[in-house]
Amino acid sequence: RSEGIGAAHMTVRVMKVAVTTAGTAGTATGNTDSDVINGEILGIFLRYTTQPATTDVTIKATSPANYNILVVNNANTDGLFAPRAKPVDNANVAITNAHAPFPVAGKVNVAVAQGDAVTNALVAHIYWRP
């Protein structure tokens, strides 16, 4: 239980998205959409299930905009990632050494490529806050 000013804003939620792959070993693919997320992505933990080192994972926002949040190529080791957007000023100039969480207002798609055909080949744990 959280208390105090802004306690509701500090709530961190986790959404698990499991991807089942189909196809030939080393080239199997699959993707799954999350439920709706309205907030900021804080981190993503990837848990692989018996996948080759050639496995590619792409996590992207699908609505209203379509953009990559995290891309991990040629990997099969579980890990925690903290993807960040690169802020710009109002003239579209990069702000040096600045990073911000990705905003999401919709579903997130988790896609796997170049893997083996496995049920729950990858489970992405998406940590976010409203």
Image (tube, rainbow, N blue to C red):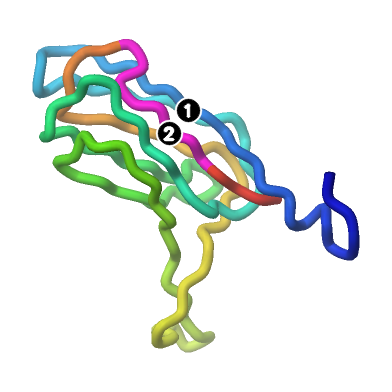
3 on left or right of 43: right
* SS type, badge 1: strand
Residue 5 drawn at (x, y percent): 89, 65
Amino acid, disc 2: Ala
Magenta segment's dominant SS is strand
Crowd band around label 1 with a 10 angstrom C-alpha radius: few (<14), some (14–19), many (20+): many
> Is 77 located above or below residue 101 in the figure?
above
Q: At 33% across and 11% down in the image, what residue appears?
A: 119
Which residue matches tag 2?
Answer: 124
Looking at the image, is mark 1 or mark 2 earlier in the sequence? 1
**Which span is picked out in magenta?**
119-126
Residue 123 magenta: yes
Residue 47 drawn at (x, y percent): 36, 31
| Residue nearest the observer in this picture, 16 or 28 | 16
> Is 62 located above or below residue 26 in the figure?
below
Identify the residue at the far right of this view.
4
Q: CA distance from mark 1 to mark 2?
A: 5 Å
52 on left or right of 36: left
Residue 111 drawn at (x, y percent): 33, 32
Q: At 59% across and 41% down in the image, what residue appears?
A: 106
Q: At 39% across and 47% down in the image, what residue appears?
A: 80
- Quadrant containing the N terminus in the rendered view: top right
* SS type, badge 2: strand
Which residue matches tag 1?
Answer: 17
Amino acid, disc 1: Val
| Residue nearest the observer in this picture, 18 or 79 | 79
